[in-house]
Amino acid sequence: MKERKITDEISLIPYFENYELTLTWYQDYDLCKQVDNIDYIYYKDRLIRMYNYLNDHGLCYYIEYKKNLIGDISLTDDNEISIVIAKDFQNLGIGKLCIKEIIKLAKDLKREEIKANIYSFNKQSQRAFTSVGFKQIDEELYVYKI
């Protein structure tokens, strides 16, 4: 797995252990609600289990913006995409560009479709995914046909 450069300012960096930084992203109650529909923040053990799962069952990347890691994105072996961007960097178009890059990766891997599970209250993510071509096929399931 290698770095995937998206623009001069945005790259996807292959996952490596960096729990001290990444835990800070998951210390935001709103972000945890968006991502996991939970009303509490992550603790380190939960974070480690999450990254181990994503790394063992697919491709996991950090999102780098202007030389700083600001989030993560993954494509699992069963074709599910997930993305988290630290709150200060949301709504800048970074997520859309990263989702498009994962679509390219899925095409390179000869995947037929990719899916995203998005909670019905997460309008921000719904807009991001549908704007790049995902179609809603169930209340919380979105699919991109390749």
Image (cartoon, helix red, strand yellow):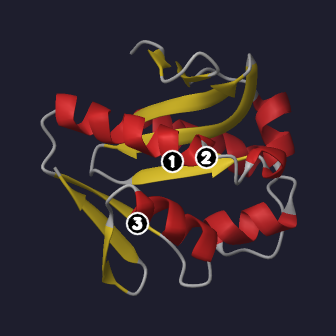
Q: Name the residue furthest top.
A: 2
Image location (x, y in percent) of residue 141: 36, 75
Q: Is residue 146 visible?
A: yes
Say which element carries label 3. helix
**Residue 96's mark?**
1
List the residue tagged with mark 3: 130
Against 34, residue 18 (above or below) is: above
**Amino acid bearing label 1:** Lys
Say which element carries label 1. helix
**Residue 93's mark?**
2
140 displayed left or right of 66: left
Q: Is residue 57 visible?
A: no
Measure the alpha-carbon separation of dots 1 and 3.
10 Å
**Amino acid bearing label 3:** Thr
Please report contact status of discs 1 and 3: CB closer than 8 Å, yes or no: no
Q: Residue at x 55, y 49 (%)?
A: 83
Q: Residues within 10 Å of mark 1 (few under 14, many from 20)?
A: some
Please report contact status of discs 3 and 2: CB closer than 8 Å, yes or no: no
Q: Residues within 10 Å of mark 3 (few under 14, many from 20)?
A: some
Say which element carries label 2. loop
Task: Answer with mark 3 or mark 2, whichever residue precedes in sequence.
Answer: 2
Report the quarter where the N terminus lies: top left
Q: Residue at x 54, y 78 (%)?
A: 119
Image location (x, y in percent) of residue 18: 74, 24
Return the residue nearer the eye: 83 or 127: 127
**Amino acid bearing label 2:** Gly
Image location (x, y in percent) of residue 45: 75, 46
Q: Residue at x 51, y 48 (%)?
A: 96
97 displayed left or right of 76: right
Against 17, residue 84 (above or below) is: below
Image location (x, y in percent) of residue 25: 80, 45
